[in-house]
Image (cartoon, rainbow, N blue to C red):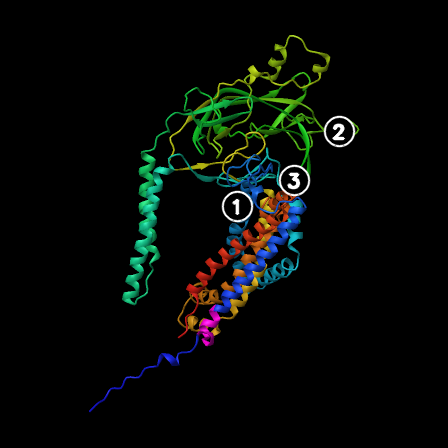
Amino acid sequence: MATRTTSYKDSSERIPFYRNVKTIGILAQIIFAVAVIAGAFIIYRNVATALTRSSLPADFSFLDSRAGIPIAETPIRYNPNDNYLKAFTIGVLNTLKVALVGVLLTSLLGVFIGVMRLSNNWILRQIATVYVETIRNTPLAVQIVFWFTAVLTPLPPRSLNPIELPGGALLSNLGLAIPWTYPSYSFSAWLPWLIVALLLFVLVFGFRRRQILLSERPGNPWLPAFIVALLVAGAGYFIAAGGSSLPTNIASEVRATSGVATVFIDANQNGRKDNDEAIVPFAAAEVSLSQGFLEAQTQELTESRQIIYSTFRFPPIKEKEFAQAQVSFVDPEASQGLSIYFENFPSEGVVYRDLNGNGSFDRGEETNTSGTRVSGYSAKLRLEVTDFKRRIVADRNGQIRIPRFSAEPAAEQESAGANISPAQLFAVPAPSEEALQLEVNIDLKESAPLVMSYPSIPIGPYFGGISLSTNYLALLLALIIYTASFIAEIVRAGIQAVPKGQTEAAKALGLSGYQIFSLIVFPQALRIILPPMISQYLNLTKNSSLAPLAAYAELFAISIIIANQTGASVPVTIMIILAYLIISLTFALVLNIVNARIALVER
């Protein structure tokens, strides 16, 4: 006969809370947190009192004041009349612009160099070794200054003579301008489709992942989810593009004196842009004019560390953008005996004297050696363009920029004057208001949800696309090249940590070298590589505070300006600490989640 006994503990035998280890641990943490908060409050009160006595800001009320800080590179719309908070936000965004791109590119370069370090090719292995040992032992500050002052500023050509890269990109001493995609006014019609595509991606991914887990067989839940989301988003894009039409009362106002047009919603239909009327950013348009004139003076300049004589440069115009173009001397009598040679018709060329009489330009004929020193020929040239047309996309301020054409040639403007004083005789006359009143036609086009903006050079700076200044490129290149030298060593160590038996077994199965590396060695090495790489990503982000060496306005540089202007050194320092802390913790959180997903699970 089986018996069952019931055992229980009397309530009088329970451990008192002050002897319970778990309870004591919780109480200790609460007491420690209260002590830290109290200590921080006491420090803050003392600092605030001291700052108040010194008539310095002790709080963050200054953030609503006008900043008055000119910032060259702004990812979002900004002007000096905005407050300090927006200026600080620009600094954070500029830091993220460096950090995100830097993390991606330095990972690719670091992995490439790390694999080269283990190559069987002796030359590749030695190149990678020299790269790592040289770069990581050179201070980062020195590398930033080198890229900015010795490479990117003096070597590329000037802005009116850019290097045209494949795809429509332009490179000059202003930096790199590349084509870029922007959301147009019809993007809102596509947005619901994107939301539906995202929801379907999550649902399909979850359903497919559950199927794989239940079947206990290998599978890829990402591919079907991505295909479904892509199909829905693609269908929505074409539907939104087909049903798009120009916004009601959209108009454009042209200021011919500056070559600038503004696209806006003309609510009162008066044909002018009023202060309360909204602009239309990223609107596609075709700018055309029947006839226009540009003028340029020959120059003697230093470009790419070479002296160039007798060169003239108009704003770059492509041959497909005009029906006819003609370049001539403004004063043919003063330029008698000189000829024009085009290096890029009709925008760029040199003025020369045909010394050997062969009817063509030979190097050296652009220099004038008759004087006491070698110099170029001085001449003023005129470019006449007929039926000019350019497809262009407005910027985020709703502005469209074209070359500053005039409606009359300068010679006719001079003859139109009734009286010319002796002082005006030798001065370059400013174009009259009537001469600049061009008949510029802005034909606004219906746009798809996304528009492709290509860079151009209407006067000097880039317009259109996305511009990466030499300051940004110098900082970015230095951070990428420097951090990649450390990542390369991490990758090399991670690959060498994979047991050689894995490689030998793969060779026994007949796998190729690429299959062995991509399917067996590198996935196992990634578990070892990723944790120390996270630290390098954080170092790259924090090292971006050296941006003032390249005159790039990021978080630290803008914060220092704010502190100097307001005297709020302590609040600004707290903002810097919190900003870098949030960025670093976000990086660490995301990458630690990835690390946990790929980590080897032991039984």
Element type at marker 3?
A: loop
As drawn, which residue projects farthest toward the top? 418
> What is the number of the mark on residue 369?
2
State which mark lies toward you, 2 or 1. Answer: 1
Neighbour class for label 3 at 10 Å: few (<14), some, many (≥20)?
some
Identify the amino acid type marked 3: Ser
Identify the amino acid type marked 1: Leu
Residue 322 picture location, percent across and down: 49, 25
Neighbour class for label 2 at 10 Å: few (<14), some, many (≥20)?
few
Residue 470 picture location, percent across and down: 60, 43
Whether residue 184 appears in this view of the structure is yes
The CA distance from mark 1 to mark 3 is 32 Å
Element type at marker 2?
A: loop
Element type at marker 1?
A: helix
Q: Nearer the viewer, residue 44 or 152?
A: 44
> What is the number of the mark on residue 304?
3
Q: Is residue 596 magenta?
A: no
Q: Does the magenta stretch include residue 19?
A: yes
Neighbour class for label 1 at 10 Å: few (<14), some, many (≥20)?
some
The structure residue drawn at horizontal position 30% and vertical position 63%, both measured from the top left corner, is 212
- Precedes in sequence: disc 1 or disc 3: 1
State which mark lies toward you, 2 or 3. Answer: 3
Identify the amino acid type marked 2: Thr
The CA distance from mark 2 to mark 3 is 23 Å
State which mark lies toward you, 1 or 3. Answer: 1
> What is the number of the mark on residue 537?
none
Q: Please report the bounds of the magenta region as a residue range.
A: 17-26
Residue of label 1: 93
